[in-house]
Amino acid sequence: MAAGQRQDSLKGWLISFLTLLVVSVGSNVYLSLKMAENSRVFGQIYSLLEEGMSDELVSVLTTITAIRGDLEVLRTQIDSTAGGLMNIDQQMRAAEDRLVERMKQELPPLLDRQLDEAWTDRAAQLRQTLETQGVRDELRQDIRAILREEIAAAK
């Protein structure tokens, strides 16, 4: 697996994790707002009890009952979200384990192949350099021999 592909894969996992984190934070904010609303409603109940307004108390009790139902639904949703996050975490760990195993299996042969190719390329370059150098040496010897013959013939 190329380094770029591995980085893209890790970026994808990071984006998924950050998305889940944002969803989790959003659900916590939503819960906080619901709890603030509940506190406000309970504050109204206490003030109504102090003032003795039974008609408004019945309305508030009805609202409380509705809020309790909403809270139960919300708790169920939170529990399922937490379970989903745990499941995703387990899947991410399993994927990481599979990636590590694949790297252990595929990386050594890949590195061996790259080293072999580099060795072969370097050997070919060296052979070519030696062959070129050998031709130069032979030309020098031929030129020296010709010069010697010319000098000997000139004397």
Image (cartoon, grey):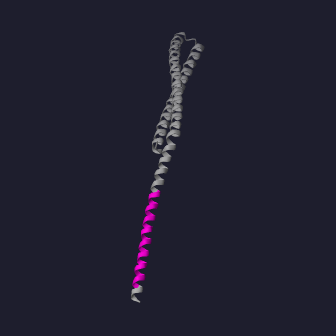
- Residue farthest bottom in this picture: 155
Q: Provide residue 90's location: percent of width, then percent of height.
A: 53, 29
Q: Which residues are magenta?
A: 122-150
Closer-to-camera residue (58/122): 122
Q: How many marks?
A: 0
In this picture, is 96 found above or below 154?
above
Corner quadrant of residue 46: top right
Q: Is residue 34 above or below residue 109?
A: above
Asked whether 66 falls inside the magenta stretch, the response is: no
Magenta span dominant secondary structure: helix
Q: Nearer the viewer, residue 36 or 16?
A: 16
In this rendering, the answer to whether 117 lies above or below 71 is below
**Residue 66, percent across and down?**
50, 14
Compared across the picture, whether 109 is left or right of 142 comes to right
Residue for point 41% across, 81% down: 147
What quarter of the picture does the C terminus occupy? bottom left
Which residue sits at x=53%, y=21%? 79
Q: Residue furthest right?
A: 50
Q: Is residue 120 left or right of residue 49?
A: left
**Is-magenta flag for residue 135?**
yes
Closer-to-camera residue (40/32): 32
Query: Which is nearer the eye, 76 or 69?
Result: 76
Spot occupied by residue 121 in the image (x, y as percentages of width and height): 45, 55
